[in-house]
Every structure is written in C-alpha cells, then in structure tokens.
Image (cartoon, rainbow, N blue to C red):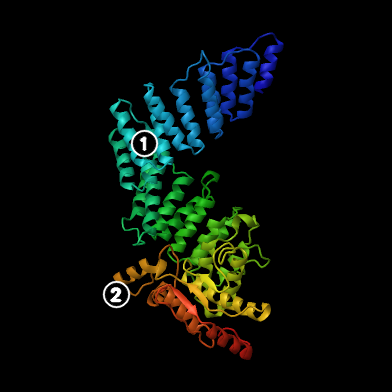
Amino acid sequence: RQLKLLDAMEEQGVPPDTIMFNSLIASCAKNRQLKIAMELFSKMKERSVMPDTITYNTVMSACASAGKWKDAMALMDKINLEPTVFPDVITYTTAMRACIKGRNTGRALTIFEMMKDRNMDLDVYAYSSAIDACAKGNKWKLGLEYLDEMRKAGIKPNPVTYSAAINACGNGGKWEMALELLSQMREKKIKPNVFTYNAAIAALAKSSRRNMKSKSGEDEEQLWCRALQLFEDMREAGLEPDAFTYTSVIDACGNGGRWQEALDLIEIMQQSGPKLRPSKVSFTAAITACAKSGKSEQAVKLFSDMQSAGIMPDRVSYNALMSSLLTGEKPELAFDVWNEMCGKANAPKDKKIASAKADIQSVSPDIITLTNAIGALDRSPESIGKVDKIFADAVLRNLVLKKDSLDTLWEVDLSGMSFAVARAAIRFVIRSASDAVINDGEEIEDLNLITGVKGAYQDLVAKRKLNDDQDTDIQLDGATAQAQIQLSRGGLREYVQECLRTDFDPPIYTTSPKLALGTVVIGKENIRRWMDAQRENNDIVK
C-alpha cells in the first residue's frame, strides 16, 4: 500500500520529500513490514531525497522488531558516514534494542558504554534497554549498578526499568532482591504492571527450580507460597494475570511439591478464554509438578488433555510424562510412551494417552528419556524384556554406547549411567560379546566395565546418612523410585558386581584391580564358563 501511494504521488506530480518518506517508513515499521521499509529507504536515494536521523531511526526500529540486528548495525555504520545526519540517543537505543532482540547482549552493552563515553543525554529508555541487556545476558550486578546510576543522575526509573531489573535478579537467582525492587516500586508510588509481576513470579519459579536441583532437593523457602501471594496481589491491584503468569506460578508450585495447587491453576486456564488457554509450556509445567510429587495418573491425564487440545507434545513434555511414571502405579506405560516417541506402530495402550501425530524428529528420545523409561520399568521383574528392547533402541539411536566413543567390545564405560540403565547395559554388552564370539569368531578377552567410584550417587549417599532415621524414598529431580535400594548397595561398582552375581545363571564373578578400583573386570574364563552354560541351558538370564 505504501509503495502504491508513493507511485500515485509521483503520477500526480507531487514529489515525496523526506517527511513523506519517513511517514511511509513509520507505517511499515508499525506493521512489521521490514522488506517494504527497506525498499522505501532505497527509493529515497534513487530519488535524491536525503534521509535524516528520523529516517534512520525508523528503519532501524523496523529491523529491531524483526530481530535483524545485523541490518540495524549496518544502518548504524551508514549513518556515521552521512555528512549531514547525526545519530542521537534514539539511534543508539534502537541499535541496543536490535542487538538484544538478536541475543547479542554484549554488543548492546558496548553501545551503551559508547553513549556514556560520548556524554550523550541518556534517558530512561536508554537505561531500561541497558538493564534489559543485563537481564538477558545474566549480568544482574551490572543491571543493579545501572539502576543506581540512573537514579543518581536524576533519571526516574519507570515500570519497564524495574521489570528489567527484577528480571535480571531472577535470572541471577536473586529472588530476594527481585522482591525488594518490587517493594521499592510500591514505596515510590510506581505502579507495577503485568510484566513487573511476571518478572517477580518468574524469579521465584527459577529459584525454586534451583532449590529442587540442590543437595536438599526441597523448596525450603516455600517460594511457591510467595508466588501465589504475588498472583493474588496482581488481582487485588486490578491486573489480570496472563498465560505467562499462570505458567510461572504452576512451575513454582510444582517445584514446591504443591501439585494440587498446580492442577487447580491449569484447570482455571482450561476453562478460560482463548488468550488464557494453557500452552505447551503450561501443560508441561503442570505435568512436571505432578511428576515431582509422584502423581502419575494426574500427569497422564494432563498429557492427554494437551493432545486433545491440539497441542503437539515435544521432548520436554514427553520427558515430564516419563518422569511421572518412575513412581506411579503404571510403570509399564513407560514402554508405550517410548515406542510412541520412536514412531513405532503400536500406540499407547492406555486410553488416556492419545497418539499424537507429531514430527518424530522433534520428539525423538534423549538420555533423560532413556533413564526415566528404564528406571520405571526396572521396578518390575516382568518388564526385563521391555527394558532390553528400549536399551537396544537407544544403542541404535546412538544415545548410549556411542560409536564415536572409546568403548570397545571388551571395554565399556558405564560411569555416566544410572543404576537401572547400567544394569540393562551389562546384559546388552555380555550378549553382544557372546554373539561376536559365536557368530563372528571373536576371541574371548577379559571384559572391563568402567564404573567410577561412587560416581553421581555420592550426594544421594550423603543425604541418606542425614536421613537414615526416616523411612521415605529419596527423590532428586524425580529421578528414581529405586534410590533407597541403590543407596543401600553403595556405588555403581558394587551395584554392577551384584547384578552380575544375581541376574545371570550361573553367577558371573568379578575382580577390581587395586590401581583401578572403579573398574569391574570379568575374566575371560568366567565369560567362557557362562557361555558354556548358555549352550547347555539355552537360557541367558534368569
């Protein structure tokens, strides 16, 4: 439309000037029509119409909105070559915004420091953009320094400034400072907006997530409660929480073990209008909340609701569902979910899990999926065949025992695996070695299984020592219902040795070299003895 208007003006003998071009380019920028804006900018040169600072600022703004930070910086270079055009604070601030949108926060901060070096009259927008760059670049301390600096310069922060500063604190794990900034706004009679509250609630959600991943594995500060309080404060202030608000509160509640509150919130979203309907992120947060509290039935229902709403699950959604099956009443569903992710013909048997026609590449399982799936199935002795099929799939997908690793037929590294995955790996490795000897004429050698000493379970062992008077399962990241059994068995080395003695018939005995205590060695005579027994019994494992 803008180009037609330009042509019409020329046909009527009215040559467009700089002001008219600026108006047309501004219209394009407002409607996110970057291509047309750039065409108009080129036509100015063709018609010998000189662009001014407003022209450059407007075109750069269109680039910033489109995330084209390199194009914006190219325009910044051009303006410096124009003899009659001088960049102003808006030019630099727009360049900063473009870099932030393009995730080049370092470049944005460099531009801001350049503005200061040139003694430009900085305003609230320039400082707000700089603090936003700090938030997205994980530089919360610098963000607070800029906030203090602008106050001393007599520049009053606005809600956008505070929202950026609160976001910076949240990304830095400093939820106390985030809430302090919110309190400062109220004291200064600056009304927080939805974005401000969202930044504060997100700060609580992020910190509660960190708490769950810490050694304690608990939300001891009850950040979920603070998040719910902010949620209510928003409503009392006449602000309507949006989907981001709900999702962040659900996340905080899930991390605090408050699965029922998380379900109540997502139910409100499901019953609301289109703008508040739960997204993939919202559903996944709620499923994760249920998983962390061992509520697999509720997690399965939410997953089904998500698919029924036409939302295609991604790997994160599937992993959240799989995590819930670790401690749920139907661990066998893990096999069906794994097959669905792998795009196999058989859909989940449970009617609550509808088969989604998602892009298989986008939901292919990863090592987390594998760990959770095998961890769930390992609870049931009847599921050993399913576990072995999943592990074989994982090998084909190069998730474990990778082709480009240092593993060989007779030396395999198990040290990064969970206990349940290592148990499945042992069966796979010994069977593979046996097949290679029988079918390919491979000579039998000593089999070295590298386990490390204690490995990733040292923290869990320490926690058990602090809680040995409690008869409760230890959960870290919802990772295993077998934690008590695993801890009582010691480190991975001891567990591997036990599996070789109890899972195989006849038992396979091992040694650990004094200079390599993290290695379990199966002597070639023991392998040969076990293989001879298999020929007689034609039965590999009990």
Secondary structure of the residue carrying numbered label 1: helix
Earlier sequence position, callout 2 versus callout 1:
1
Please give the label number shown on residue 90. none
Residue 406 in percent (x, y) is at 54, 65
Classify residue 462 by image quadrant: bottom left
Residue 421 in percent (x, y) is at 51, 71
- Residue type, label 1: Tyr
Assign the N terminus to one quadrant of the image: top right
Please give the label number shown on residue 469. 2
Assign the C terminus to one quadrant of the image: bottom right
Task: Say which residue appears at 53% left-offset and 79% top-offset.
Answer: 446
Number of labels in the image equals 2
Residue 247 in percent (x, y) is at 46, 50
Secondary structure of the residue carrying numbered label 2: loop
Classify residue 200 by image quadrant: top left
Q: CA distance from mark 2 to mark 1?
A: 47 Å
- Give the residue at mark 1: 162
Task: Say which residue appears at 42% left-offset and 41% top-offset.
Answer: 137
Q: Is residue 430 above or below residue 137?
A: below
Inspect this view and state whether residue 239 appears.
no
- Residue type, label 2: Asp
